[in-house]
Amino acid sequence: MATVSTDLNYLQGKKGLFSWIFSVDHKRIGLLYLYALITFFLVGVTLGILMRLELLNPGKDLLEAQTYNQIFTLHGVIMIFLFIIPSIPAVFGNFFLPIMLGTDDVSFPRLNLLSWWIYIIGAIMALSTLIFGDGPADTGWTFYAPYSVKTGTNVTMSVLAAFVLGFSSILTGLNFIVTIHRLRTPGMTFLKMPLFAWALYATSWIQLLATPIIGITLMMIVAERFFGVGLFDPSIGGDPILYQHLFWIYSHPAVYIMALPAFGIISELLPTFARRTIFGYKAIAFSSLAIAFVGYFIWGHHMFTSGMSGTGRFIFSILTFLVAIPTAIKVFNWVATLYKGSIHVHTPLLYALAFIFQFMIGGFTGLLLGALATDIHLHDTYFVVGHFHYVMFGGTGFAFFGALHYWFPKIWGKMYNAKVANTAFTLLFIGFNTLYFPMLIAGLMGMPRRYYDYLPEFHLPNMISTFGSWILAVGLILMLGNLIYAYFKSKEKPGRNPWGGITLEWQTQSPPPVQNFDRMPELPKNGPYDFEHKPTIKE
Amino acid sequence: MEHASGFVLPNSGHNRDAEASKMGMWLFLFTELLLFGGLFIVYMVYRMINHEAFLLSSFELDVTMGTINTVVLLVSSMTIAMSITAIQKGNIKLSVNLLYATLAAAIIFMVIKYFEWSSKIHHGLFPGMDYYESLPKGEGLFFYLYFFMTGLHALHIIIGAVIIGVVIYRTKKGLVTSEKYTLTENAGLYWHLVDLIWIYLFPLFYLIH
Ligand SMILES: [Cu+2]
């Protein structure tokens, strides 16, 4: 093996663009993902704010109906395929999984780099619809047939982009599964792994087992547009319901690709800031697997109103309710972890608490959508939009920001201004809830989603919602500004372990050296959160 | 990788790990199976809806050619399995020759496929052609799925052939040895999968009457 001659950290050493975009170091690849993801996230946010501006008042103000349709589609495609699906695994999984397992890289470092490149190619394809062809798709991110077969916009390219991005996601998942099986440090059994690793493990299996289905389904859409053969378009002999089944067989499990890693983050943050072992380690670990497993069989709940037998609806509804059980197990365990803990309130903990609050609203509203009677009323209303954003943004998004604040000192060896970070958090929290809670109410009142206009009786919730989007935007700018400022200007050296965590990443230098550890990491005696027998971490 | 202080981590992602490579390959094969799985679902659904039409159309396919191709693939699966045994025993020359035999089988398969496809296209059965458009919808779907699924399978044959070519090249250069033959094993796994998928495609299109 190559010998590294100095004790340089991973940020030092080779310099220049090429040393980054062709790096096989999992830490550098994680950061490559981070920079790309944040960029696409900001594009998606901008599109979202544009939509909210259009919806500030009833009637057409800013955007044509067609433009609005294209914008909400692109917003969905970017946020789902470019941001939230890769988000936590690609950035923090890549950076921290090997460190938390006590090894120096993933099992297939070159494949890891390839995944990033495939991701970038897919991203360029998705964004190219803005410039080339007949404009971005206007179908919604679900690409429902038959409209996706008929519309003149550039559906083909968007769909191909989603296919390519899926491939990147599969390769990352494959890499993580093998890494977890093969590279755990001696003494770390499966049941002594950090819960973040467990969450990534369950996520990776879903990525592997669900993504190929959407891949082939999207290929069928492309072929149908190309050859005009009706697999899904009823006017040429196809079955649009079949498309919906195939689409949701992937896309419902995909919701857990987005949510499970966030659960993993929360399970790391709470023990560290409560200075106490996690309550119900096994329950949390296995409930991830249970969610992954049951989540595979409940896709039909997206189709209660599109033509399905009574029996089918009944079964899908019951199974959907079943998922609530392992999810609730996690929430109870998290809350129990805080109980009688020695709670240290820092910015990452605030994000974790906001996660629990917002994810619970997202989860409960999900139950209303999974119940047959209420779903008939709520289907395709703003209630769905509100629910979805509570889960994805209020849940995964906030967990992502929490993780960013938690590991910032480890990744860069610098510290941000805590006061500004807390202010930004407060703005984000208020902005988020002002933005999305009114959507739940507008949906209950019956406002349909995906229109650029609405009836005057929906004016108030829409107005409040748009105000919320401004608060949220200010919060985002403040949060990112604070971190970027710290990156360039911070003089504060946080040391190895600023938060008093005991998982392995806190035992190494900040930033970590190229091979991740400068001395053998020490495992706590009884599992990863054993604060009773915590290893002493010398600087 | 070693540190200046002389400290070396016990597990490294940069170490050679044959188990890991094979595990990775198996996981990848799962995804391939599911990729075709989506198509099998579509096939099943449309076969149930258009039972008669699928039955009628399946008589248009050439069972003899299909059978020959099945035999060719089965034999090739055997030759690549034998090639792995040969390399395990250190017989590099035999291993390479068996890989060549597998490659030849891949080429024979593609040539036969070419003749099959061209005769179908000659009869105007490819989507978009006049005769195809005049067919009843069920029969059209049959041929569409036939081209889609066998086409995707043929693509996998080509990829497999390229992989086998790489294995031959690397074995000849001495990079694959009786100590280090994961590459051959992985190529074998992939090739068996391609074979396996054909074993399902063949009865679905040619045999079920
Ligand atoms: Cu769902």
Image (spheres, coloured by chain):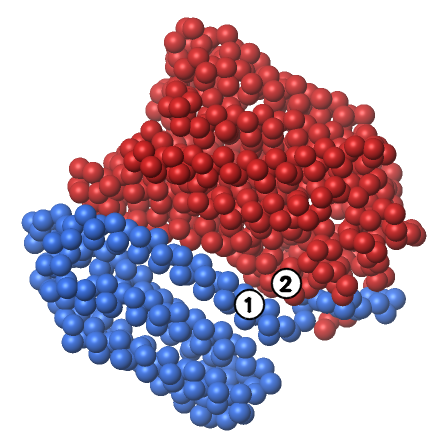
Chain colours: A red, B blue
Q: Residue at x 56, y 61 (%)?
A: A111
As drawn, A87 above or below A353 = below
Q: Residue at x 40, y 24 (%)?
A: A373
Q: Residue at x 29, y 33 (%)?
A: A307
Marks 2 and 1 close (CB-CB < 8 Å): yes
Q: Amino acid at mark 1?
A: Met
Q: Which quadrant of the figure contains the N terminus of chain A?
A: bottom right
> Is the residue marked by circle 2 packed among few (<14), some (14-19), or many (20+) residues within 10 Å?
some
> Where residue A386 sits: x, y (%)?
51, 24
The reply to whether label 2 and label 1 mark residues of one chain is no
Tag 1 subunit: B
Give the number of the disc on residue A135.
Answer: none
- Tell me if A289 is positioned left or right of A184 in this view: left
Q: Amino acid at mark 2?
A: His
Q: Residue at x 30, y 70 (%)?
A: B199
Choose between A265 and A378: the one closer to the eye.
A378
Q: Please say whether residue A95 is visible from this viewpoint.
A: no
SS at mark 2? helix
Tag 2 subunit: A
Choose between A387 and A92: the one closer to the eye.
A387
Q: In which image quadrant can residue B118 be found?
A: bottom left
> Where residue A477 sits: x, y (%)?
66, 26
Q: Please say whether residue A471 is visible from this viewpoint.
A: yes
SS at mark 1? helix
Is ligand 1 closer than 8 angstroms to the Cβ of mark 1? no
* Alpha carbons under labels 2 and 1: distance apart: 9 Å
- Tell me if B100 is positioned left or right of A407 in this view: left
Give the number of the disc on residue A181.
Answer: 2
Q: Which residue is mark 1?
A: B23
As drawn, A230 above or below B115 = above
